């Protein structure tokens, strides 16, 4: 019995680590809830795979929206402001795209969800290393 408990604990530790590996943020965007994950934690300079799950009020996946992601860094000494935009494509129940951070530091990320002529957005920051 003790062996079984130990094996179970080890299993949960490993799966726990696997889950903690992704960068994840959950935000409200109007009536939607968006769950954003990035496959690296912390995100890094260069390409990062980003996935967005959009849920409606009842928690159901929204798969007929247009999702785009804008990411920017304000001007710094010796660096003009940087602004990028990418459209995310639906793959299964998530919208996927790549963010390419051209330098390390704090990036402002805005996820836009357009559906039925309305656009809702969620903002968060990413500290790229
Ligand atoms: Cu910069």
Image (tube, rainbow, N blue to C red):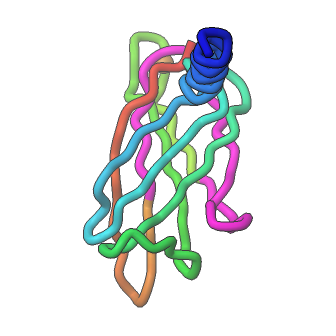
Count every numbered label the image shows and give the total. 0
Residue 101 occupies which quadrant of the picture? Answer: top right
Instruction: Considering the whole magenta stretch, tell me its main secondary structure.
Output: strand
Q: Residue visible at 34% across and 46% down?
A: 123
Residue 30 occupies which quadrant of the picture? Answer: bottom left
* Horizontal relation, residue 78 to residue 97: left or right: left
Could you say where residue 14 lies in the image, as x and y percent from the top left? Answer: 65, 18
Depth check: 62 or 115 in front? 62
Residue 120 occupies which quadrant of the picture? Answer: bottom left
Q: Residue visible at 61% across and 49% down?
A: 51
- As for residue 10 lying within the magenta part, the answer is no
Could you say where residue 43 lies in the image, as x and y percent from the top left? Answer: 59, 23
Q: Residue most toward the bottom?
A: 116
Could you say where residue 108 lies in the image, as x and y percent from the top left? Answer: 40, 35
Could you say where residue 125 lies in the image, as x and y percent from the top left? Answer: 38, 32
- As for residue 91 lying within the magenta part, the answer is yes
Where the N terminus falls, by quadrant? top right
Q: Residue visible at 68% across and 33% down?
A: 48
Q: Is residue 102 in view from this perspective?
A: no
The region drawn magenta spans 86-111
Q: Is residue 108 in view from this perspective?
A: yes
Where the C terminus falls, by quadrant? top right
Q: Residue visible at 52% across and 53% down?
A: 69
């Amino acid at each position: 019995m003790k062996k079984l408990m130990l094996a179970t604990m080890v299993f949960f530790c490993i799966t726990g680590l696997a889950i903690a590996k992704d960068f994840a943020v959950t935000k409200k965007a109007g009536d939607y809830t968006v769950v954003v994950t990035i496959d690296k934690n912390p995100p890094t300079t260069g390409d990062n795979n980003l996935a967005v799950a959009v849920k409606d009020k009842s928690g159901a996946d929204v798969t007929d929206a247009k999702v785009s992601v804008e990411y920017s860094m304000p001007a710094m000494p010796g660096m003009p402001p940087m602004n990028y935009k990418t459209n995310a494509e639906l793959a299964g129940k998530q919208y996927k795209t790549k963010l390419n951070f051209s330098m390390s530091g704090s990036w402002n990320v805005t996820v836009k969800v357009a559906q039925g002529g309305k656009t809702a957005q969620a903002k968060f920051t990413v500290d790229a290393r």
